[in-house]
Image: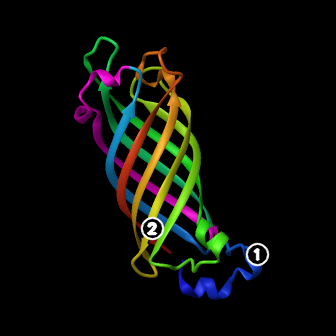
Amino acid sequence: MPAALMQAYPLPDGNMQVLKGSEGWFVGTGVGAQLYVGDSDGKQDFGYRISAMAEVDAGKWITPTMALRFQAVGARATGGSISGKEDAMNLMHFHVDFLADVLALLAKRDVSSFYTPLPFVGVGFAMTDLKKRNCATLTVGLLNRFNINEHIDLNLELKGTLLSDKMDGFVGGCSGEGTAMLSAGFTYKF
């Protein structure tokens, strides 16, 4: 958060001040790798199962320590089919996340520090280019934020998403599927 905002809205005695509606907005983007974990994916080489992903997001800091973010992620998920053959699908995932600067909340650390770990949890919706393979999702992760200046952050994000068992087209085996994603990107703060 810009230093001017922190002076205008301090957190006295752990009290969180809500930022004005026009303050605390941000947009970002990132690219990275994803690993799809489905019922038959273990039948393929690990390297084949890693594929590229891209993400865009927009959000708002509600207080200097808590934010809401909408993120859209696209990936070409690769893995295996029950027959043992290579399989792939286009995967889109839209989710809303709650991010918290836990160190600033608990230890009263300066929210404009160079490095800030931001754990998050989110809910959303995933869909593929294949029939009837859409589902609700639960996402958890850690956004590692590196504050470059008042407007730019560099990010390294690790997240996992729980998906329905039907996403890879095979129902059975495990009761669910998921993705693990690692991305690097940046955020622009207005």
| Residue drawn at the location 32% of the way across and 24% of the way down | 42
Q: Which residue is mark 1?
A: 15
Q: Is residue 145 left or right of residue 135?
A: left
Residue 145 tag number = 2
Q: Secondary structure at mark 1?
A: loop
Q: Which residues are magenta?
A: 40-65
The spot of residue 68 in percent (x, y) is 60, 59
- What amino acid is found at the position of numbered circle 2 in the picture? Arg
Residue 187 tag number = none
- What amino acid is found at the position of numbered circle 1 in the picture? Asn
State whether residue 22 is above or below residue 90: below
| Residue drawn at the location 34% of the way across and 58% of the way down | 184
Which residue is farthest front?
A: 107
Give whichever of discs 1 and 2 has the lower sequence position: 1
The spot of residue 147 in percent (x, y) is 43, 75
Q: Local crowd at mark 1 within 10 Å, few (<14), some, or many (≥20)?
A: few
Which image quarter holds the N terminus? bottom right
